[in-house]
Amino acid sequence: MKILNILLIIITLVCSAFTIFSEIDQDIVIILKDSSIILTVMVPYIIQKLFKVKLNDGLITIWIIFIFLAHYLGVTAEFYNKWPLFDKITHTMSGILTSYIALVILNYQKTKNKVFNVLFLVSFSWLCAGMWEVFEFTCNYFFGGDAQRVVTTGVSDTMWDMIVAFLGSIAVSIWYILKSKFS
């Protein structure tokens, strides 16, 4: 799994470097946006160093794949503009990823109350989805742009993003309940 993670990071960084160097004559905001993937893909390793914890290799793999899909393909390669469903797919994946992160947190806490755990999974996922939408809104406000597609959809895009993240967390909750029943 560690080799896979290293390979995925290399692929992501090479793709990002190629894009950044091909945009040298672009606006600094575009270069910073596309350069931010380098920091974003390294977040799990930064967390491990800062907080002196060992993160699950599977979680790191999911994180890197998600960042590649959402950040590199979605934003940098503009898949969000080319394929409208791409946005919903990545937001559904974010619900799954954040629920998985919630499961990792619960495993550290060793909480056995299944009702609490499911509520925590869904709440944590929705909290992350809401924080992401606030982040997008703040970036739009300060740097321009329309990542939330307010101009074309009103608040529909933001609401659907949060709904599909919620559905992703529900899928993980169902998997968690079934896994606990049969283990």
Image (tube, rainbow, N blue to C red):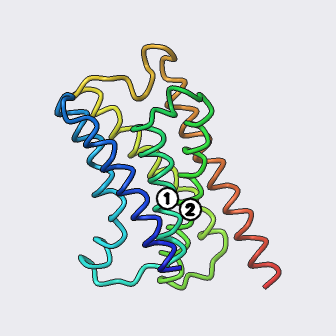
Asked whether the beta carbons under mark 1 and mark 2 sit within 8 Å of each other, the answer is: yes
The residue type indicated by label 1 comes to: Phe
Q: Could you classify mark 2 by the number of other residues whose Cα lies within 10 Å: few (under 14), some (14-19), or many (20 or more)?
A: many
The residue labelled by disc 2 is: 99
Quarter of the C terminus within the rendering: bottom right
The residue labelled by disc 1 is: 124
138 lies left or right of 149: left
Report x, y in % for residue 144: 26, 23
Q: Residue at x 38, y 46 (%)?
A: 131
Residue 145 tag number: none
Q: Residue at x 53, y 27 (%)?
A: 157
Q: Secondary structure at mark 1?
A: helix
The residue type indicated by label 2 comes to: Ser
Q: Could you classify mark 1 by the number of other residues whose Cα lies within 10 Å: few (under 14), some (14-19), or many (20 or more)?
A: many
Query: With respect to residue 114, does 39 lie above or below?
Result: above
Mark whose residue sits in front, 1 or 2: 2
Whole-Å distance between the Cαs marked 1 and 2? 7 Å
Report x, y in % for residue 174: 74, 62
Question: Residue lying furthest right in this view?
Answer: 182
Q: Secondary structure at mark 2?
A: helix
114 lies left or right of 133: right
Query: With respect to residue 150, does 59 lie above or below?
Result: below
